Structure formats: C-alpha cells, structure tokens
Image: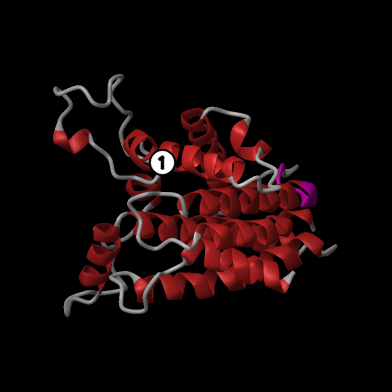
Amino acid sequence: MSASVQRFSRLSCFSASATSVAAVELQNLRTHVTSLSKLAIKAIRSKSTDKLVVAPFLGRSLLECVFAALLIRIDKFRGAAVSRFAAHQNYDPNLPQKHSMSWQGDVVPRERPEPDIWAPTVKPDAVSRALFSDYCIDIFWASATVEMLDYIQDNGLLVDVTPFSSHAPHALFARYKGQAMQLYSLFSKGLHGDYLMMRVSPFDALTADEALRQTLDILVQMSLISHFVADSIDCLPRAQAIAAYESAKELSDV
C-alpha cells in the first residue's frame, strides 16, 4: 500500500522541473498528500471510534491539498501569485489573507455561470478560473478526458475506463464537482463540531470510511486526467501516468 500512496502523491503533485514556477509548492503539497493518504488508509482500517475525530480533518485536507496541486499545475499564475503574496514582508500568518487559496473561488466558482458561458456579453469578472468552473471544465478537463480515453483505446491498454466513460466529459466533471462539494460539507461539519450537537450523529464509522474512500477515488481519477491536459507542462509521460493510476486506485480498496 505504501507504493500506491507514493504513486498517488506523484500523480497528483507532479512537477516536471525542480526549477519550475510551482516546484516548491508542489513538493510541499506532495509531502502532505503522502502523509494524509497514509493516515486516511490507517483510519479506514481502524476499528477504533477515533476515526470519527480524525476522518473529517483527513478528508477535507486531502480535498484541499490535491485540488490545490491540480489547480497550480494547470494555472501557473495562480500558484505563483499565492507564493509571492505569502513571501511579502508584511505577510502576517495570524491574519486572514485575501489572496490565499480558498475553496470558494479557487476550487468551486463563487458565482453561478451564465447560461451561455462564451457569449460576448459575459462580463470579464464572471469568467471564473476555479478548478470546477464551467470554463476550466470546457477548456481543460473535458478535452483531457477525451484525450485520455483515446490514448487508452488507441494503445490497447487494459485499463478499466468505466469510471470515466459512464458519463460524457462535461457531465463527468459536473458529477465530480457535486461529489466534492458534498464531501467537503460532510467533513467540514465534523471539523466544526456540528455532529456533536446531535443526539444521533449521521457521521458514523461506516459513513467515515465510505467518505474517505470516495474522496480517494475522485482525487485519484482527476489526478490521472490532469496528465492529459494539453496546456499543462507538469505532466508525467502518459504511460507512466497510467501505471501510477493503476497502482494508486487500489487505495480505496482497503
């Protein structure tokens, strides 16, 4: 299982060069993803009720770290900007930072998209660069999914593509978005103590295990697709990405 964890962290946080714009950030994220994945697997395997305490932290942290890595591999400007602001002499870690990575804005868009996202009348401020924005899905994710499926078919690879081919590419990422938002909400309620205020908590051991498994599935699948994004330089050779995925997808089988 340790090999699967290492391949997952490489698949999600790969940097093509130690001198690239986001190399340091991706290495930091890779270290965290490795540790979080190991702890998540340990929590799933555990019979202790301690998992109800740690699962919300592990699940939400995995979502935040991997999505941050995927975003800055696709959008170098965003990663570099966050780093520059954090390096400023007046940066104070004790204060909220307007330019830090955030779930609302960087992962999911703040505003609902226009019905026709490419209409000339759309205001510039409405064009979201969030990972799950309709713009990122249309420009990056949908075409990368098609490219990945074509590569697997054209090379006769024995890869189970059911998780990717059961929906059209745009619908696939709408599903990923919906699942990620539900998981983020579920884990956040655990972190904030919402479940402690309930006489019967809906967050039991089975729910915790299933939520962590589902989180790993989504993150591993999106990490593979990210290596087929044409405009990203931080991509593994395709054969290596497929091999890493085949190992990493075993994480949720524990």
Look at the numbered disc 1 and give the secondary structure of its residue: loop
Segment colored magenta: 202-206
Give the residue displayed 74% in from the left and 46% down from the top. 207
Residue farthest toward the top in the current orientation of the protein: 115
Magenta-colored stretch includes residue 204: yes
Is disc 1 surrounded by few (<14), some (14 to 19) or many (20+) residues within 10 Å? many
Residue indicated by mark 1: 132
Residue farthest toward the front in the current orientation of the protein: 155
Query: Is 226 in front, or is 195?
Result: 226
Query: Is 123 in front, or is 23?
Result: 23
State the quadrant of the N terminus. bottom right
Residue 252 rendering spot, x and y as whole percentages: 72, 54
The image quadrant of residue 244 is bottom right
Name above or below for residue 81 compared with residue 122: below
Residue 242 rendering spot, x and y as whole percentages: 60, 56
State the quadrant of the C terminus. bottom right
Give the residue displayed 27% in from the left and 58% down from the top. 78
The image quadrant of residue 137 is top left
SS assignment for the magenta stretch, majority: loop
Magenta-colored stretch includes residue 146: no
Residue farthest toward the right in the current orientation of the protein: 47
Amino acid type at circle 1 is: Phe
Query: Is 145 in front, or is 204?
Result: 145
Name above or below for residue 209 compared with residue 5: above
